[in-house]
Image (tube, rainbow, N blue to C red):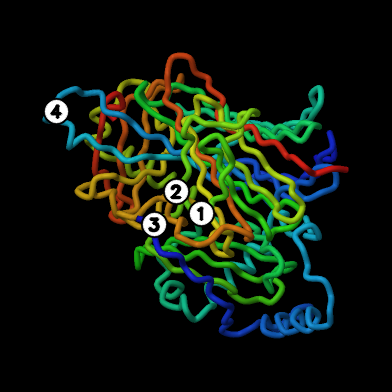
């Protein structure tokens, strides 16, 4: 059954940063409303600014992460500090949403301490978290997690016993179990494929990233 | 290299994403807006059991896996090339035994081909690929859109969100689904590859239901995009479409999956 629709949370900034070029979201919304009331045409998608889709600069990424971790709703996550930033990418919202035309960053974080995912939209113009969802869904693995899964698998005795001469880690797949009895059904997991550099795969090791241990070692042909 | 392409009656922008391949955005045909953005959020891979032993069947269920197609898996640059009657973007991705070439082809007659060539051996022969494309078409504006499917020898308006598999019927041009702009009468026609075993999810656009960074929802829940499907009305609103192909690996690989998309009714 499909998950229920999630309502888009309205922006409730904890504290808007003082920025000379930006107003608080409430003010922006009211300005737009005033314009609409004045008979101006509703902005359309055809007039969207393509530069809003441009990749974030390192400074914008840093700004987005600072804003997110300073948000009071994520205070415990930031304090404990057991989280991984999965992705930070530009986000562009369509008119007539009040954030249309703003420079936005979408930040996805996996919080290991609470086993939860934070999916946030940061309004870089206003310096606020304008949309925040905390769910039990599993985002993709970060590059660090991919590398960690490989290092855990490579030091596991059961894996080492199954490797042939010349086998190396080929890649880390983003994996989840289908069977509720499977540890990877509900827990953050990865599957490391080992094999020869010519592409032939020999062994698959499933790694539980919450406990940093290998939970399954399967010959590739039996996967 | 500029990320704005103005060729073959099309003007569009592109960028390489972290996990959804090459994303194309703000695409116009003959000066009229067609697409807000389109991408390939993920390609999941399922494995079938090799054993015929019934006793071992239950314990041998592995889930799907996937790997992001993007900055961490791209091999070489994104290429922009013209061809007779159009322009295309292409990029190769590799993760271990899985290899893909993503294509976006734009034809001067209004056709658009978001395709994925799949090759590489996989971990064994018994596996199936499920590429998921997400299209946010905005024909002449975001609102006043409707979604239709061809069934019973005619087009039917679809009232609410849902999952619409290809049932074998198509109009004379091969199109099975279409998104129409109610005001302008223009349409986006979608013709599946006949071997894609394709399906389309039609979902009302919501801020917050952006392309997810994983097909995996909460444990035990439907994966995305099925998790986005509710019972909201589509007619007259802004619609997002997901095209999903199901491609079983066989000896005749490589295989190119993905739909033909044709813009209709957008004059100059």
Check if mark 2 and mark 1 are on a common chain: yes
Q: Give the alpha-carbon distance from disc 4 to disc 3, as whole Å.
A: 31 Å
Question: In the visual, does A70 lie left or right of B62?
Answer: right
Q: What residue is shown with label 4?
A: B54
Chain ID of residue with mark 1: B
Q: What residue is shown with label 2?
A: B215
User: How far from the left and from the top, in percent, is residue B42?
Assistant: 51, 42
Q: Which residue lies at the image location 67% right of the left edge and 33% below the top edge?
A: B113
Q: Which mark is residue B107?
A: none
Q: Give the alpha-carbon distance from disc 2 to disc 1, as whole Å.
A: 7 Å
Q: Which residue lies at the image location 42% right of the left edge and 55% below the top edge?
A: B227
Res B236 visible? yes
Badge 4: residue crowd in 10 Å (few <14, some 14–19, many ≥20): few
Q: What residue is shown with label 3?
A: A2
Q: Earlier in the sequence, mark 2 or mark 4?
A: 4
Q: Give the alpha-carbon distance from disc 2 to disc 4, as whole Å.
A: 30 Å
Q: What residue is shown with label 1?
A: B212
Badge 2: residue crowd in 10 Å (few <14, some 14–19, many ≥20): many
Check if mark 2 and mark 4 are on a common chain: yes
User: How far from the left and from the top, in percent, is residue B85?
Assistant: 81, 26
Helix, strand or loop at label 2? It is loop
- Farthest right residue in view: B268
Total marks in image:
4
């Amino acid at each position: 059954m499909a998950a229920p629709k999630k309502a888009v949370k309205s922006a409730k900034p904890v504290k808007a940063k003082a920025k000379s070029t930006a107003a608080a979201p409430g003010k922006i919304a009211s300005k737009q409303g005033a314009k609409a009331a004045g008979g101006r045409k509703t902005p359309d998608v055809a007039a969207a600014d393509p530069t809003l889709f441009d990749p974030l600069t390192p400074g914008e990424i840093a700004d987005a992460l600072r804003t997110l971790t300073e948000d009071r709703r994520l205070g415990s996550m930031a304090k404990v500090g057991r989280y991984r930033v999965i992705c930070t990418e530009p986000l562009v919202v369509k008119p007539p949403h009040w954030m249309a035309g703003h420079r936005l960053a979408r930040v996805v974080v996996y919080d290991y301490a609470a086993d939860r995912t934070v999916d946030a939209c940061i309004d870089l113009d206003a310096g606020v978290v304008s949309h925040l969802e905390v769910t039990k869904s599993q985002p993709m693995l970060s590059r660090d997690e991919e590398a960690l899964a490989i290092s855990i698998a490579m030091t596991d005795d059961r894996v080492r016993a199954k490797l042939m001469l010349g086998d190396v880690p080929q890649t880390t797949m983003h994996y989840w179990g289908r069977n509720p009895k499977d540890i990877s059904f509900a827990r953050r997991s990865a599957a490391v494929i080992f094999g020869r550099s010519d592409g032939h795969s020999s062994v698959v090791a499933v790694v539980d990233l919450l406990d940093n241990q290998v939970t399954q070692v399967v010959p590739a042909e039996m996967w | 290299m500029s990320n704005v392409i103005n060729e073959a009656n099309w003007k569009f922008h592109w960028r390489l994403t972290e996990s959804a391949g090459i994303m194309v955005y703000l695409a116009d045909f003959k000066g009229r807006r067609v697409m807000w953005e389109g991408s390939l959020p993920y390609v999941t891979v399922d494995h079938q059991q090799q054993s015929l032993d019934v006793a071992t069947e239950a314990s041998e269920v592995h889930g799907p896996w996937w790997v992001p197609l993007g900055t961490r898996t791209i091999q070489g640059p994104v290429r922009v090339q013209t061809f007779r009657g159009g322009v295309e973007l292409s990029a190769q991705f590799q993760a271990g035994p899985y290899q893909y070439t993503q294509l976006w082809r734009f034809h001067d007659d209004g056709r658009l081909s978001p395709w994925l060539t799949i090759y590489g051996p996989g971990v064994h022969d018994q596996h199936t690929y499920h590429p998921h494309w997400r299209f946010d078409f905005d024909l002449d504006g975001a609102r006043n859109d409707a979604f239709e499917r061809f069934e019973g020898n005619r087009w039917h308006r679809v009232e609410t969100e849902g999952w619409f598999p290809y049932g074998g019927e198509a109009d004379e041009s091969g199109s099975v689904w279409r998104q129409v702009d109610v005001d302008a009468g223009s349409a986006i026609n979608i013709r599946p590859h006949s071997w894609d075993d394709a399906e389309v999810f039609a979902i009302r656009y919501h801020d917050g239901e952006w392309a997810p960074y994983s097909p995996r929802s909460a444990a035990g829940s439907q994966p995305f995009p099925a998790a986005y499907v509710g019972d909201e009305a589509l007619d007259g609103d802004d619609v997002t479409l997901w095209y999903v192909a199901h491609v079983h690996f066989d000896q005749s690989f490589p295989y190119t999956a993905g739909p033909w998309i044709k813009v209709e009714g957008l004059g100059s």
